[in-house]
Image: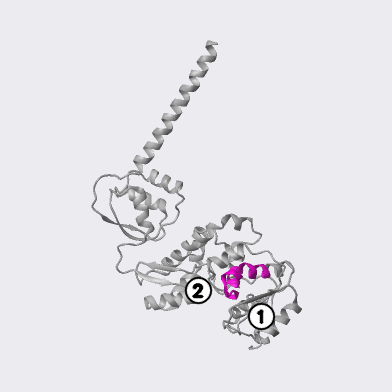
Amino acid sequence: MKKRFSIKKLIIFLLILLIIFALAIVSTYFIMIGPKDKNTKEKEFEIKQGWTYYDVAEELEKENYIKSALFFKLYLKINKIDSVEAGKYKISSSNKVEEIIEIFKEGNNTNENAVLLTIPEGKHITDIADYMSKISGKESSYYLKVWQSKEFINNVIEKYWFITNKVKNKKLKYALEGYFFPNTYELQDKDVTPEYVAYKLLDQTDIILTKYKDEIEKSKYSVHELLTMASIVEHEAILDEDRPLIASVFYNRLDANMKLQSCATVGYAIDEWKLTYSSSDLNTDSPYNTYYYTGLPVGPGNSPSEKSIEAAINPAESKYYYFMADVCSGNQKTYFSKSYSEHTSKVNKYLGCL
């Protein structure tokens, strides 16, 4: 009985020690992510292009803004924070870790030379180069040359989980077509390098695709193929709610070994966008032309939105093999069909203007 009582006391003692130890860890954590000192004077802190938050943590400790890079990283891990925007920020050592990160999240707050780059959904990499040309005054080719270079392609493959050797396919018009996420970006100034622009855009693509990483890993399609499908959906969809159904039509055709026959791919193949295409257009021998070749095109034909990416990753379930958009009446309606005869009937009924 005495022995049993001693074991019970030992267990209680160990539990108390464990609780004290846990409280000490928690207490230490909150102390270490608190302000380094009471100096409220703000200084300029620069986050350089290509830095990760771990690089930022080391530099903040080195410049005496925070108590510990280790606890800064721990805070990031606990709160699942993984991206940071290059730029110059005003912070002080009286800021808590949480406050410093909030300042970084707000974006560059000291750069008067900052400019905005706006990329609409469905635009092409050549359009993005043109936008940068208008901002900087440099030729579009200045950007495209770097983005197509072997060295840069190898660097982005190494840096980003979603970019693979598939972008090295020599049949691609542009290696990174479809990988630059459409959004509005703040650039440090008009003379930023092509690499700076690309990393800025790819960092955002990383954020978007990481949301769906589990689904992507379970998919039978690669990221490259999913972005390719998303780019087709982006061009074909009139309404957001149509996107998952349009994706289902194309996946159903793939499963049935039917040609996708997407006008979006013809347009990209001939670099001309029309409401209707001639038989000569449809017979263009291009790895992008899904009227000519069965299966997905060799790569994306534009920069798809998140809604199109999500539709490509999580398509609706349907038995549709055909669809058409009513471009004649202006009612923005998409009609879906299970058979070719049903589809033909709808084309004759709604597309008389073509």
Tag 1: residue type?
Asp
Label 2 Cα crowd, 10 Å radius (few <14 / some 14-19 / many 20+):
many
Label 1 vs 2, first from the N-terminus:
2
**Badge 2 is on which residue?**
125
Tag 2: residue type?
Ile
User: Which element carries disc 1, helix, strand or loop?
Assistant: loop
Q: Quadrant of residue 224?
A: bottom right
Label 1 Cα crowd, 10 Å radius (few <14 / some 14-19 / many 20+):
some
Task: Nearest to the eye among marks 1 and 2: give it.
Answer: 2
**Badge 1 is on which residue?**
285
Q: Residue furthest bottom?
A: 353
**Distance of mark 1 from mark 2, alpha carbons?**
22 Å
Q: Are marks 1 and 2 in contact (CB under 8 Å)?
A: no
Residue 16 place in picture, x, y as percent: 44, 26
Q: Which residues are magenta?
A: 228-250
State the count of labels: 2
Residue 228 place in picture, x, y as percent: 60, 69
Residue 303 is one of the magenta-drawn residues: no
What quarter of the picture does the C terminus occupy? bottom right
What quarter of the picture does the N terminus occupy? top right
Q: Nearer the viewer, residue 341 or 22?
A: 341
